[in-house]
Image (cartoon, rainbow, N blue to C red):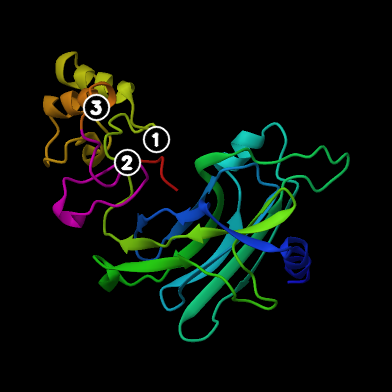
């Protein structure tokens, strides 16, 4: 908490509201009793020197585990350099069933102070909050909102970007965590390598016509969501990737559970979701 108080002082320069800058959260599906990553994404029109962000959730459904920048777009963009300062704080129960956590990052915190910033960009993931849901199967089919919030904590923490030495308050959006009884996967990822691309169409064609490997996850191979795996899925993927065809239905482009749950066609082996 002492470190975050320092960060609050560092970032609490004169505030301006920048509507073109925004923090957003990814909606995601999870199994009751499992760990879920709440991913924060950033749209920034100018290079960012640092940021603070804070989220809240229903504390009767989720408990806080950690927050980190591992595997984020921000880390990849800064590589081979790194985020030089990162800290966080949390409060399991702020009253009225609200759980809360906040974090702060500075991109250039240590000598030789080269002026490192995160370049302008859109939709880049910058931090992940790890939450664990309660193990209650009655939650299947329901959703709970996770929000980005200002003014909670002691001292109060706002969602802030530091740009050119000035603290800017970006616009904020919330997201839903939905409970499913299906293991998470990405629709259209027929070869289960964690991404949907041309290789998936080739994989399906090989499976149908050249005695290739069987899809490990039928639901992810069902690109057109018609509850069967056939050549139509390969055609759908080619149309999507090259002919401006429709994108796959949820869960896509991020990992998630089957919206149909146990009524779907199933997923026996998919290992590329958190």
Query: Where, quadrant-wise, is the N terminus in this rendering?
Result: bottom right
Position of residue 36 relative to residue 273, above or below, is: below
Residue drawn at point x = 88 percent, y = 39 percent: 112
Task: Say which element carries label 1.
Answer: loop
Which residue matches tag 3?
244
Type of secondary structure dominating the magenta stretch:
loop
Q: Is residue 101 above or below residue 82?
A: below
Q: CA distance from mark 3 to mark 1?
A: 22 Å
Q: Nearer the viewer, residue 255 or 165?
A: 165
Foreground of the two, 249 or 256: 249
Percent position of residue 159, x then y: 59, 63
Task: Measuring from the top left, give residue 201's x and y in whole percent.
Answer: 25, 23
Based on the picture, tell me whether residue 255 belongs to the magenta stretch: yes
The numbered mark, 3 or 2, whose residue comes first in the sequence reads 2
Secondary element under disc 3, as helix, strand or loop, is loop
The quarter of the displayed image where residue 233 is located: top left
Image disc number at residue 194? 1
Q: Are marks 2 and 1 in contact (CB under 8 Å)?
A: yes
Magenta stretch bounds: 246-268
Lateral position of residue 24 relative to residue 90, left or right: left
Task: Please state if 6 lies on the left or on the right of 189 as rendered.
Answer: right
Question: Which residue sits at x=26%, y=38%?
Answer: 220
Q: Label 1: few (<14), some or many (≥20) within 10 Å?
A: some
Where does label 2 land, which residue?
Answer: 186
């Amino acid at each position: 908490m002492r470190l975050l108080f320092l960060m609050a002082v560092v970032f609490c320069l004169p505030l301006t509201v920048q509507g073109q800058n925004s923090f957003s959260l990814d909606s995601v599906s999870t199994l009751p009793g499992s760990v879920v990553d709440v991913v924060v994404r950033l749209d920034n029109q100018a290079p960012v020197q640092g940021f603070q962000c804070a989220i809240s959730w229903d504390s009767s459904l989720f408990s806080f585990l950690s927050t980190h920048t591992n595997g984020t777009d921000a880390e990849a963009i800064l590589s081979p350099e790194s985020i030089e300062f990162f800290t966080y704080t949390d409060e399991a129960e702020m009253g009225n069933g609200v759980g809360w956590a906040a974090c702060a990052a500075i991109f250039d915190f240590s000598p030789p102070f080269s002026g490192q910033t995160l370049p302008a960009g859109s939709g880049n993931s910058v931090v992940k909050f790890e939450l664990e849901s309660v193990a209650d199967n009655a939650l299947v089919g329901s959703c709970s909102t996770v929000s980005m919030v200002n003014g909670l904590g002691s001292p109060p923490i706002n969602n802030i970007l530091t740009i050119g030495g000035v603290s800017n308050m970006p616009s904020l959006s919330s997201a839903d965590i939905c409970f499913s009884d299906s293991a998470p996967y990405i629709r259209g990822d027929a070869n289960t390598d964690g991404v949907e691309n041309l290789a998936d169409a080739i994989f399906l064609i090989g499976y149908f016509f050249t005695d290739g490997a069987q899809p490990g996850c039928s639901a992810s191979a069902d690109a057109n969501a018609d509850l069967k795996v056939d050549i139509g899925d390969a055609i759908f993927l080619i149309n999507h990737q090259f002919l401006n065809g429709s994108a796959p239905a949820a869960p896509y482009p991020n990992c998630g559970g089957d919206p149909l749950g146990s009524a779907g066609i199933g997923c026996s082996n998919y290992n590329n979701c958190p």
